[in-house]
Image (tube, rainbow, N blue to C red):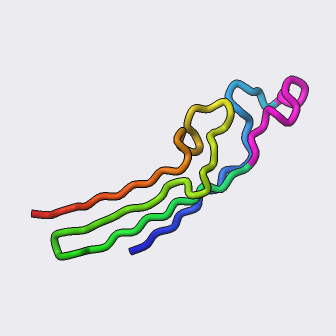
């Protein structure tokens, strides 16, 4: 199985920015641009009781908003994972 997911986040006011006054206080710097976050993962059954899986989150390496530590993208940017699952 292969899975591709995309999440769209539209323009947003940054943390502690009031939407009613951002233009006067911050100008366009008070609004974060829209962003697409892409993830892909796959899994494969080796046997009836063993499965391997892996994937990449945030394929394009989007950075978090300047006022955030990790959201909407991970603080580390692109993230790879893999593993196995066994049933006994």
Residue 73 in picture, x, y percent from top left: 57, 45
Farthest residue, direction right = 24
Please indicate whether residue 39 sits to the left or right of residue 84 in the image: right
Q: Is residue 78 magenta?
A: no
Q: Which residues are magenta?
A: 20-33
Quarter of the view holding residue 8:
bottom right
Assign the N terminus to one quadrant of the image: bottom left
Please indicate whether residue 3 sits to the left or right of residue 53 in the image: right
Residue 83 in picture, x, y percent from top left: 30, 58
Position of 72 relative to 19 (above/below): below
| Residue at horizontal 71 percent and vertical 33 percent from the top | 14
| Residue at horizontal 23 percent and vertical 75 percent from the top | 46
Position of 51 relative to 83 (above/below): below
Assign the C terminus to one quadrant of the image: bottom left
Give the total of numbered labels.
Answer: 0
Farthest residue, direction left = 88
Quarter of the view holding residue 55:
bottom left
Please indicate whether residue 75 sits to the left or right of residue 48 in the image: right
Q: Nearer the viewer, residue 3 or 47?
A: 47
Quarter of the view holding residue 23:
top right
Residue 11 in picture, x, y percent from top left: 75, 46
Residue 72 in picture, x, y percent from top left: 59, 43
Position of 81 relative to 2 (above/below): above
| Residue at horizontal 74 percent and vertical 40 percent from the top | 32
| Residue at horizontal 39 percent and vertical 55 percent from the top | 81
């Amino acid at each position: 199985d292969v899975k591709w997911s995309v999440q769209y986040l539209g323009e947003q006011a940054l943390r502690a920015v009031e939407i009613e006054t951002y233009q006067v206080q911050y100008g366009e710097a008070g609004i974060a641009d829209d962003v697409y976050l892409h993830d892909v993962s796959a899994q494969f059954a080796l046997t009836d009781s063993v499965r391997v899986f892996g994937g990449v989150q945030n394929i394009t390496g989007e950075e978090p908003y300047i006022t955030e530590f990790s959201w909407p993208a991970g603080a580390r940017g692109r993230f790879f994972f893999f593993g196995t699952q066994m049933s006994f």
